[in-house]
Image (tube, rainbow, N blue to C red):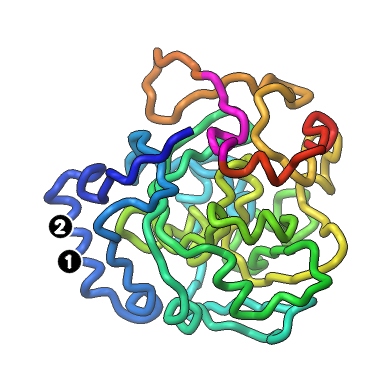
Amino acid sequence: MAYKNVLKYSDVTPKADYMNRRQLMGGAAGLFAGMAIAPALGASKYSTDAAPNTFDEISAYNNFYEFGTGKEDPARHAHQLTIDPWSVQIGGMVDKPGSYGLEDILTKVSQEERIYRFRCVEAWSMVIPWYGFELNQLLNMAGVQSGAKYVAFETLVREEEMPGIRSVNIEWPYREGLRLDEAMHPLTIMATGIYDKPMPKQNGAPLRLIVPWKYGFKSIKSIVRVTLTDKQPQTTWNMLQPREYGFYSNVNPQVSHPRWSQATERTIGGGLFAKRKETLMFNGYEEEVAGLYTGMDLAKNF
């Protein structure tokens, strides 16, 4: 698969909207002033040349069970979420454990645009222009110790602001995890925005993981804790239904979900009569990440 470094924010957004959004961002205060989302002049070498979905499509159709199980529930309820100030507790097998303030993190990392394909385990897909930084920058900041093999993540739990916590039968907090080599891969990012806007709350503000070759539920939202460990961490959907959701959850059209095929996907925004398209191995990122799984049986290690 080839990437083309050709897209700019202005290529995927009407010019008037693009300029208005940049002016709005220029006047942002508080946390988002620290984020300083000033889009790169060109897309990253890791960006796809596929046409992105619109901001409205991306921000209106979400899974974020802390706010409810319906696709519209996050957009309906997430405005209640308080995200300023925000910090991430980094611990476990690191040299510099502690609470890392997001504003401080963002002064020490290099952010850029990443236009990635996004494939949900429910067999729908989007193309999303994320803005953020490689996770390896944050891990290096904390100092990964030599015995660490995995990275575990946890989402915020705040029942008074997250109505889904009271009604959805999940053991909170939401948990996810990666092998260390997956976490250090340059495709793996911590996203802080979409287009030229700060991350919408319903999409996982202010900081979420993006692992584009894995099903979307691996890209945990509203992260407050990162732990380096030598043991494979528990992950929420694997805890709930291990037969249906593996630890790796790499996009694999040859391995069906027990209740539906993963061979094709429905493109959000494609229209009522749009044909389903074939799903690509590793969501189209096979050239970049297949080597991480050499010798593994990806039908068993799903």
The CA span between labels 2 and 1 is 6 Å
Image quadrant in which you'd find residue 63: top right
Residue at 84%, 57% (x, y): give it: 232
The percent coordinates of residue 93 (x first, y second) are 79, 77
Q: Would you say the magenta stretch is mainly helix, strand or loop? A: helix
Indicate the secondary structure of the residue bearing disc 1.
Answer: helix
Q: Which residues are magenta?
A: 278-287
From this viewpoint, is residue 173 visible? yes
From this viewpoint, is residue 59 visible? no
Q: Quick one: 264 or 160, which is closer to the camera? A: 264
Q: Which residue is mark 2?
A: 19
Q: Which residue is mark 1?
A: 23
> What label sits on residue 223 in the rendered view?
none
CB under 8 Å between discs 2 and 1:
yes
Q: Quick one: 234 or 151, which is closer to the camera? A: 151
Image quadrant in which you'd find residue 11: top left
Few, some or many residues within 10 Å of mark 2 (<14, 14–19, 20+): some
